[in-house]
Image (cartoon, grey):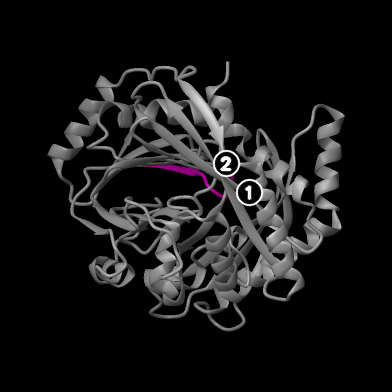
Amino acid sequence: MKILEIGKVDLASLCYLNKERYPFLLESVNHNDNNRYSILFAFPGKSIVLDNFSDFNFLSELEKQFKLNNLKTNLPFSGGWFVYLSYELIGQIEPILSEELHTSELPIAYAVKIPSAIIIDHQLNTTYLIDQDNDQNRIDTILSDIDAIKPIPEAGVLGELDQENEDKFLSGVKACLDYIVAGDVFQVNLSRQWQYKLTKEIDSTIIYHALKNSNPAPFSALIQYENFSIVSSSPERLFSVQDGILQTRPIAGTHPRGQGSEDEAQKEGLISHPKEIAEHVMLLDLERNDMGRVCEYGSVFVNEVMTLETYPYVHHIVSNIKGKLKERVTIKGIVQALFPGGTITGCPKVRCMQIISELEQMPRGPYTGSLGYLSQDGKMDFNILIRSFVHTGKKLTFRAGAGIVYDSIPERELAETKHKAAGLVKIFQD
């Protein structure tokens, strides 16, 4: 393996230069101690693509092809696999759901073998180029591409925005409340869709460049592969693994930003609100239970409890949970235990996902799915795909949701979806 320290690079500009060579970017735009790295994956190799539930078991195939080595580095990625999981992959994890899920023409999941990457350590302000095989041709090509990059153009106002009927969402919230009163569930995360119709074809990198400026986030991503792109400004981690320690970082609890002193009042109102606290604690219990399925008994603990994170349009309540993985637990076991994240389904998970399918009446696709990587030294990191566009042809779609609990007020939950969508809507406004 070869590791070179190189000069500062705008990773998205390399995606714009050559999306076939650089199809996957995970970027910590709003970086913090929880995500200090950005990674541009280069030279995609063989792939595993799941188009239909009956094709094969995706996680089993990935588990079989992913090979660990004993080479340890301080970097998060040293060669391995990039992985995309749509929300609908749950049909292979919980077969009872497979007949109830809505599907589309997009892949259900894929994994791509990756030998090279550019990694930025934002904490040390240092950039590295890595190649797992010490392939000088690949290294020279990347260095040559860096010299050839050009600025990414501005997006501008390019079309018309439509949003899903508000009455459908409001009636869905009322139906969730009926299910909660009946004792089926404690909380349901219900979402709604926005669609932007472009007047002309536009490169996904241009959209990503605009989004990361308007809505910077620690788990941003640009994915250009197969027949669609994902343009994400996600703030949420699904899970990470390092040195046998599994972590998840759930977000549950949202208030909009305010101006001046009003913003401080919004923070205080969020962190002290009985409804938000109760919802967060319930989901913490769900996530701890999920972690307990793959972690050693007694090792799971909450090391950050209800901290406040602030983003351009919202404040969030966030916690962090750690546990020591049991021996011989692989990527399949981890995803089966934790996917999809409880914060974007509800509690209990399986019944919530049945209700979501009934009420949303369309596939979620990438929304509330996940992107991440498996490094050959055993490190892993996966986000939750929220605040994210799906780009196909002249169409951009995205979804935003709200957690419905016993005392939810439908109109306020509708307003919450709009607050969460604001950063995405902003990029198309003057």
Task: Determine if the magenta segment contains residue 37.
Answer: yes
Q: Amino acid at mark 2?
A: Glu
Circle 1 is placed at which residue position? 168
Circle 2 is placed at which residue position? 164
The spot of residue 225 in percent (x, y) is 29, 43
Check whether the beta carbons of the residues at disc 2 and disc 1 lie within 8 A of each other: yes
Q: Amino acid at mark 1?
A: Lys
Crowding at dot 2, Cα within 10 Å, few <14 / some 14-19 / many 20+, comes out as: few
Q: Quadrant of the C terminus?
A: top right
The spot of residue 190 in percent (x, y) is 62, 55
Q: Is residue 393 above or below residue 299?
A: above
Q: Is residue 6 above or below residue 279?
A: above
Crowding at dot 1, Cα within 10 Å, few <14 / some 14-19 / many 20+, comes out as: few
Q: Is residue 304 visible?
A: no
Which residue is nearer to you in this view: 151 or 175?
175
Q: Which residues are magenta?
A: 31-39
* Secondary structure of residue under mark 2: loop
Which residue is nearer to you in this view: 321 or 258?
258
Q: Residue at x 85, y 58 (%)?
A: 274
